[in-house]
Amino acid sequence: QVVSMGLYMGEQAYLRSSWNILDGFLVFVSLIDIVVSMAGGAKILGVLRVLRLLRTLRPLRVISRAPGLKLVVETLITSLKPIGNIVLICCAFFIIFGILGVQLFKGKFFYCLGPDVKNITNKSDCLQANYKWVHHKYNFDNLGQALMSLFVLASKDGWVNIMYHGLDAVGVDQQPMTNNNPWMLLYFISFLLIVSFFVLNMFVGVVVENFHKCRQHQEVEEAKRREEKRQRRMEKKRREAQKLPYYASYSNVRLMIHTLCTNHYLDLIITFIICINVITMSLEHYNQPHSLDLALKYCNYFFTSTFVLESILKLIAFGFRRFFKDWNQLDLAIVLLSVMGITLEEIEISAALPINPTIIRIMRVLRIARLKLLKMATGMRALLDTVVQALPQVGNLGLLFMLLFFIYAALGVELFGELCNQDYPCEGMSRHATFENFGMAFLTLFQVSTGDNWNGIMKDTLRECPPDHATDVDYACNPSLQFISPMYFVSFVLTAQFVLINVVVAVLMKHLDDSNKEAQEEAEMDAEIELELAQGTLCCMGAPGCGSAGAEKGSHSDSSLATGSSEGSLQTTLEEGLSFSISPPQNVDLPAAPLPHECPLREANAGISSPVQTLRLRPSPSSALTLQATVGQQRSQSSGRG
């Protein structure tokens, strides 16, 4: 690439790209490591092997080819400046409390380690008893140790232990006493209130705010896409509104079933049955009596039969094409799994099965998800739809999480893979949390990202080497770990626990806000379509034959129509507060002959129930034909001559 593009000169030169600089640096470090290894000094410059692991950053180059990932990274990069300001505020508070902590607790976090320390009061007594005089890993002996201890406090993981160590502190070279100075509680509580609850939440707020700012340049494109989508949906709704309803050709029996399935009371009944089913499932427990087993079994038969009957009725009412839309596939899958579970339970009585019916029986719990399918659960449906819509961006964040975990897991195996063994066991690390291999390192980092005992794991990486083994490679003792370990864990906790998690929250909140806007636009679209249909109906009312067509199709009409003379005003009031009025010109006779053009909506409106409810006369002083539409407090009026 250097030969083809050039090293530095030119816009497309190799070093003009930051990704190429990183890649070249990592390749150069790898070459140095290979040369040192071939020379027999692999352990002398073992830190270079850690630098070689930075080649795992190369997958981040895919960000430039993935718009979603690029948006996330741009958000974090553009947030550096305002985040830098809040970081300065955080550092100021950390330094202030750190200096104050050093003044209060320096040299006081030591204690005597031995089998019986009741009579030990100071360091001299401890050493005379051949005990060990040791200090807590999180202390305030200097500013660096104080800052690390304060970060553990701010993360709210294990902060209580540090607080009680401060309360028990007596003095330099003095054995701690329980609750020796309770007033020190004010120091720790004030730090938690100011920094952990207030300043760090400001940090989170800045991240979320800058995420929204980064999306502002895309608002124009999103608004354009929303408008195009709105026009397509409106055109689709307009075509559907001008067609006969899909159930117009149903027989009387199927039409009755359709009316039953679209009735609001059916949703109430199904909701009640699902709730009773959940209650019966929660009654199951260990060592339950045989009578309860039979009762729950028959209840399951009843509920399953009810849901099967409901599915059959809906299949008849809506047909296969309309039934298998949205989340109805989940509904049918739950019903089929319930039937399969009952069948396997019955077969198990007489024969051994390769499949445990309990696995399918567990799927009954998914019946609770059917509450989402109900029409009245609009809030639940909107929330779940928001989560589904946010999955692409959350997936991009998940990929970024995977890259972060991959990099830190590889570094953790190299740094801490041989830290613990049977002769010198760890306290925080165990067989459930270790860096011995890549898989366990990945799982351990996930535990750290949740904030569970991450300070105990870091404490093991900070421990001193066993006596007389300061340079023994079997214990992976490396003095540099005292500096590398805090940077490793603090950077990971800040990135994973504080930044990326809150970006995920910002994505979900943004999609929830967009879903609310779409719901509002949907309501406005429906009102606009009703307005157009009503205008088309009034157009037909002015044409000869429209009234007869409406009379022939009177069975589909839900409203009544009253007519008067041509002089005056024709006004209609539709459902949901939508009204129209037509004012003909004064002293002008409307033609009795057929109009020269045909109403385009006459054929369609013949099969649609008329929304007209009332018609009254009103004198009009104007000499023009006026059409006036009113929706609530909004009014539109058009007039023309001729």
Image (tube, rainbow, N blue to C red):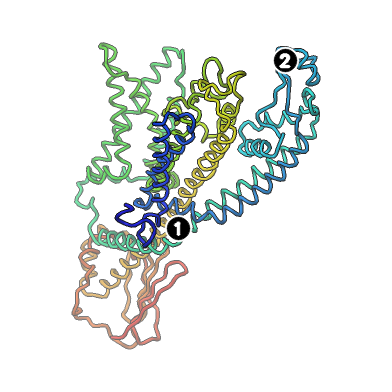
481 to the left or right of 526: right
Camera-side residue: 171 or 560? 171
Q: Say if 565 sits above or below 273 in the image.
A: below
Q: Say if 529 sits above or below 325 in the image.
A: below
Camera-side residue: 465 or 255? 465
Pointer 1 residue: 215
Residue 408 location in percent, x, y? 47, 36
477 to the left or right of 369: right
Q: Say if 292 sits above or below 584 in the image.
A: above
Q: Residue at x 57, y 56 (%)?
A: 82
Q: Given this view, does label 2 or label 1 mark the residue nearer the observer?
A: 2
Pointer 2 residue: 131
Q: Say if 120 sits above or below 545 in the image.
A: above
Residue 45 location in percent, x, y? 48, 33
Q: Quarter of the image holding residue 629?
A: bottom left
Residue 628 location in percent, x, y? 38, 75
Instruction: Identify the secondary structure beneath mark 1.
Output: loop
Residue 293 location in percent, x, y? 40, 16
The three-letter code of the residue at mark 1 reads: Arg
